[in-house]
Amino acid sequence: AIGAFTAFLNDPEVKLVGVEPAGHGLDTAMHSATLTLGKPSQIHGMACYVLEDEQGEPLPVLYFYHGFGDTGLSAIDQGRLPQIMDNLLAEGKIKPMLVVVPDTETDIVQAIPENYPPKDRRKAFYPLNAKAADRELMHDIIPMVDARFNVRKDANGRALAGLSQGGYQALVSGMNHLESFGWLGTFSGVTTTTVPDEGVAARFKQPEAINRQLHNFTVVVGERDSVTGKDIAGLRSES
C-alpha cells in the first residue's frame, strides 16, 4: 500500500510511517498471527500498487513454496523466480499474475528442523511443519493477499506449487483445501508416499472430484533424482 504515497518519498516535509496491527504488542501473546509473530514472505508482481491485467481485471495468484533448508529469498535469488516468470510472460506463455513465496519452514517450537536428526525429519518434522504452514496459508497469508491486493479470489484464479519440501506443502494444502485452488504443481516434491497425510489420502480416493476441480496437476521429477524419485513414483501410483 505504500506505493500510493510514492509522490511524497522525496518531500523533506513529509514523514512516511508504516504501521502493522499487532494486537497488544509484539512482545505479548495477544496478537492475531497464526504463527508466533508471523513470517516474512516474498511477493513478486507488477511495479505498481494497483494490480490488474490489460483488461483491468484482478490478477490471478501463484503461491510458491521453496525447498528444505532454504528461505523465500532462495527462490527469488537462487531459483531466479522473478526472471523465470518475467521471461514466460514476455514469451506469452503465462498471463500476468502475482507470485507469493511464503516461508516453507514455520519455525514453530514443535517443528524446528535442526532439532530432528535427518533420519527422523520425514517422520516427525515434516507433518508438524506442514500442518502449521497450512494453517498460516489459509488463515493468514491468503486472506492478507486477498485484502491488500487487487487479485482474483476464486479458485480458478489461484495456483499452488512448490519444490522439494515445498512440493509436499503444496500437495498437503492443495488436497486438503481442494476447493480453494484451480492449479497444483509439485517439483521434485516429497509426497505422502514417505510422509503420509490423512487428508491427502482421503482426497486421492475421490479422483473425479480432483479432475473436476483442477485445471492442471503438474508432477515433475528428474530421471536421476535419488532424493524424491521414490516419492514421485509412489504419488503416481496413488493418484
Image (tube, rainbow, N blue to C red):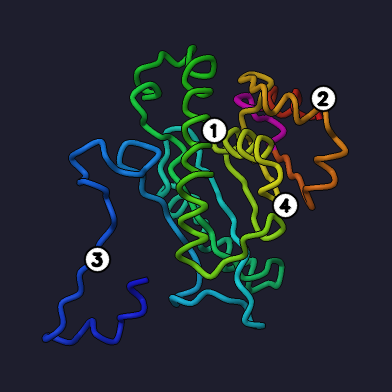
Q: Amino acid at mark 4?
A: Gly
Indicate which disc residue 237 carries. Answer: 2
Q: Is residue 201 magenta?
A: no
**Label 4 sits on residue:** 182
Q: Which corner quadrant holds the N terminus?
A: bottom left
**Label 3 sits on residue:** 18
Residue 12 quadrant: bottom left
Q: Which corner quadrant holds the C terminus?
A: top right
Q: Amino acid at mark 2?
A: Ser
Image position of 195 (left or right of 201):
left
Q: Earlier in the sequence, mark 4 or mark 2?
A: 4
Region rendered in magenta: 221-228
- Circle 2 packing at 10 Å, graded few (<14), some (14-19), many (20+), is few
- Circle 4 packing at 10 Å, graded few (<14), some (14-19), many (20+), is many
Vertical position of residue 238 compared to residue 73: above or below: above
Label 2 secondary element:
helix
**Label 1 sits on residue:** 165
Q: Main secondary structure of the magenta part?
A: loop
Q: Decide: marks 2, 1 in contact (CB < 8 A)? A: no
Q: Decide: marks 3, 4 in contact (CB < 8 A)? A: no
Vertical position of residue 120 compared to residue 77: above or below: above
Q: Amino acid at mark 1?
A: Gln
Q: Position of residue 31 (x, y in %)?
A: 30, 43
Residue 188 quadrant: top right
CA distance separating discs 2 and 3: 50 Å
